[in-house]
Image (cartoon, rainbow, N blue to C red):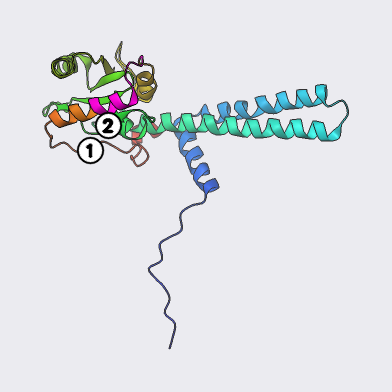
Amino acid sequence: MARTKDTSSAPKEPGRMKQMWQVFQMTRRYDSSAQWLMLLGFLAPVLVGLALALWLGDGNGLTIALWIVAGVLAGFLLALVILGRRAERAAYSQIDGQPGAVGAVLRSGLRRGWVGNEMPVAVNGKTQDAVYRAVGRGGVVLISEGPVSRTQRMLDDEKRKIARVLPNVPVTLIAVGHEEGAVELHRLAATMRKTKRTLTKPEVLAVSNRLNSLQTALPIPKGIDPMKARPQRGKMR
């Protein structure tokens, strides 16, 4: 019996090093300073390790080599940390200002301990302005997407609704944008983490479940995935 080739095999995914190289290329395209920051982050620990090797090595080749290797490893790790942060910022810059951008951050940019939803809790069908909600140790955070002049009333209305149901839970209002007093999209997650902790982990889940049970489903498209967003041609020039 003749053998038949398996044509249903899925294409191989790129290896880890290739993925890192692709992320680096994307980041460098949108953030020209990223490569220099990574180089500085790599060289600083290497130089420190070399200095410690010459100071503490006392002519011992093994000790000197260990200090140099430690510096190289620390530099490589620091460069990866810098790449990760700059890559995240570059990815969010591609969707900044688009409807659903805040939902993308709430879905993929929050750490453990936060309960966020990529679907807005309030939306203006004409302007596409929206208000999103997240619950964490700092209480409830309401985030507006759109000009402050149009979204402030939406934020205040949602805050009053929460106050009627959960009067003892603090509510923080955040406007995302480039206006004065607003928070830029790539700084949203960090700003939310700075809220003062007032709730325990069980209380976070209880508050989130309580609010979700009162929320009416809205026929709104889901947010944008920053890692799958198409780059805007104007920003690549």
Horizontal placement of 93 versus 148: left or right?
right
Q: Are marks 1 and 2 in contact (CB under 8 Å)?
A: yes
Residue at 79% over, 27% down: 53
Separation (CA) of disc 1 from disc 2: 7 Å
Foreground pick, 110 / 163? 163
Q: What residue did someone put label 1 on?
A: 222
Foreground pick, 187 / 29? 187
The magenta region covers: 196-207
Q: What residue did someone put label 2 on?
A: 103
- What percent of the width, then of the height, locates residue 138? 32, 18
The residue sitting at the top extreme is 180
- What percent of the width, then of the height, locates residue 58? 87, 25
Residue at 69% over, 30% down: 71
Figure quadrant of residue 101: top left
The residue sitting at the bottom extreme is 1
Figure quadrant of residue 169: top left
Figure quadrant of residue 221: top left
